Image (cartoon, rainbow, N blue to C red):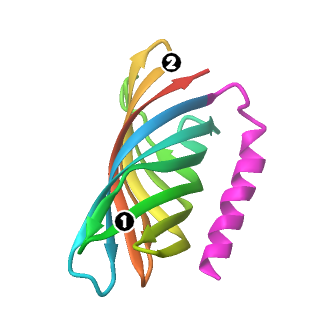
Amino acid sequence: MFKKIVTTSITLAALTLGSHALAANYVGGNISAMNYERDGVSDDADLVALYGRLGTEFSENFSGELRLGTGIDDDKIYGRKVKLNHMYGAYVRGGIPIAQTFYPYAIVGVTRAKTKFGSTSNTESDISLGLGTDIRMGNGLDLNLEYMNYLDKSRAQLDGFSIGLSKRF
């Protein structure tokens, strides 16, 4: 029930606020060092993913974002291959600009990810939470640093740090 409320709220905010700021869009990409934990297994896996970001700044303090990504480096736990096949999601970011170059933010949304552990594939969705910052480098180019907890389900957890670039237009 909570997931439906958050998903509906994010969608309504994007539709309502997005029409007011159509000129403040951005596109970018990040590389993420992720940690995958599986319940009942004492070890965890280190994965690497790439994802693209497409967003709209609703105001100085809020933006909405869509992401689509894939795993690019796998790991093994007890000889069983661990892989992130793909992930995608919708998010809302809220932050406070500091000066003209630093934009720390909190991010919340919904992520759907397909992972593989040995021969078992899992597709899970969960509420995602994170913290990050954009560092404005000039000419609409931003450096992005972020920590995100993508999934925290009973079977598996997926979180990680990422770094990337985005271009505002």
Q: Residue at x 37, y 24 (%)?
A: 101
- Expressed as whole percent of the image width and height from the top left, the position of residue 19 reads 78, 38
Tell me the mark number nearer the camera, choosing from 2 and 1: 1
What amino acid does circle 2 point to?
Answer: Gly
Nearer to us in this view, 74 or 90: 74
Range shown magenta:
1-25
> Which picture quadrant has residue 137?
top left
Q: Which residue position is annotated with label 2?
A: 140
Quarter of the rendering occupied by the C terminus: top right
How far apart are the two marked residues, 2 and 1, measured between alpha carbons?
A: 37 Å
What amino acid does circle 1 point to?
Answer: Val
Q: Which residue position is annotated with label 1?
A: 82
Determine the residue located farthest toward the top in the rendered image. Answer: 139
Which structural element holds mark 1? strand
How would you rate the neighbour count of disc 1 (Cα within 10 Å): few for under 14, some for 14-19, many for 20 or more? many
- Expressed as whole percent of the image width and height from the top left, the position of residue 109 reads 55, 60
Q: Residue at x 48, y 12 (%)?
A: 139
Whether residue 16 sits left or right of residue 151 in the image: it is right
In primary-sequence order, the first of circles 2 and 1 is 1
Determine the residue located farthest toward the bottom in the rendered image. Answer: 40
- Tell me the tag on residue 129: none
Position of 146 relative to 153 (above/below): above
How would you rate the neighbour count of disc 2 (Cα within 10 Å): few for under 14, some for 14-19, many for 20 or more? few
> Which picture quadrant has residue 81?
bottom left
Which structural element holds mark 2? loop
Q: Residue at x 26, y 71 (%)?
A: 79
Quarter of the rendering occupied by the N terminus: bottom right
